[in-house]
Amino acid sequence: MNIQRAQIINLNQVGDDRGTLIVIEGSKDIPFEIARIFYIYGVEKNVVRGKHANRNSAFLFINISGSSKVKVDYGNTTEIYELNKPNIALFVPKMVWKDMYDFSSDSVLMVLSDKKYDETEYIRNYNDYLKEVMGAFE
Ligand code: TYD
């Protein structure tokens, strides 16, 4: 299995003396068409969310307010990204294990996905995830 890496995308800021505006058009500013948007806020400091991988869905994470960290895990290596600006997005491809944590009290983490919600494509057990990605490292 070929697992793509996460990557930071710098979103274009349209600013003038009235403030700043950011546009996200599917398949133009980000590498997929948008099927779903959700956002996470009001998370206590010590809470870890996510703790899953998705067999089919890719995601784009943006802290449109405050900050949080996203740890991505490919099975054999991990990376930690701090998201703290509304113009910084983290693209996370399918089949990557994700933890979101260290939410600031003002954190609003917006998440875009290329797929509608389907619980059956979630892998919520880390050992199951390792088994499914194992083929990539053999
Ligand atoms: P969960 O996957 O635990 O959130 P996180 O990725 O932040 O840890 O989802 C929390 C609840 O919300 C769970 O009952 C499933 C539901 N949910 C949806 O119905 N649709 C969605 O798009 C998402 C992301 C979650």
Image (cartoon, rainbow, N blue to C red):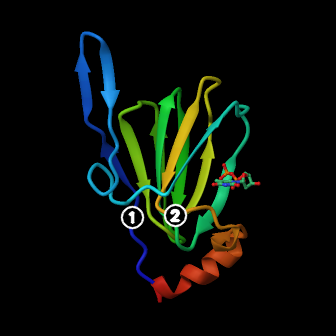
Residue located at (39% from left, 69% from top):
4
- Left or right: where 120 falls relative to 90: right
Question: Where residue 48 sits: x, y (%)?
Answer: 70, 46
Q: Position of residue 125 (x, y in %)?
A: 73, 70
Q: Helix, strand or loop at disc 1?
A: loop
**Image-based side of 94 in relation to 100, left or right:** left
Q: Mark 2 belongs to which amino acid?
A: Lys
Give the number of marks: 2
Q: Nearer the viewer, residue 56 or 102?
A: 56
Residue at 57% from the left image edge and 32% from the top image edge: 108
Q: Residues within 10 Å of mark 2 (few under 14, many from 20)?
A: some
Q: Nearer the viewer, residue 32 or 75?
A: 32
Q: Residue at x 62, y 36 (%)?
A: 102
Query: Picture quarter containing residue 69?
Result: top right
Q: Amino acid at mark 1?
A: Arg
Q: Is residue 95 above or below residue 111?
A: below
Name above or below for residue 84 compared with residue 89: above
Report whether 16 appears left or right of 40: left
Q: Position of residue 113 (x, y in %)?
A: 49, 56
Residue 43: assigned label: none
Q: Secondary structure at mark 2?
A: loop
Q: Residue at x 42, y 48 (%)?
A: 90
Image location of residue 10, percent across then percent down: 29, 41
Q: Which residue is mark 1?
A: 5
CA gap, disc 2 to disc 1?
A: 18 Å
Look at discs 2 and 1 and give the one toward the viewer.
2
**To which residue does mark 2 refer?**
115
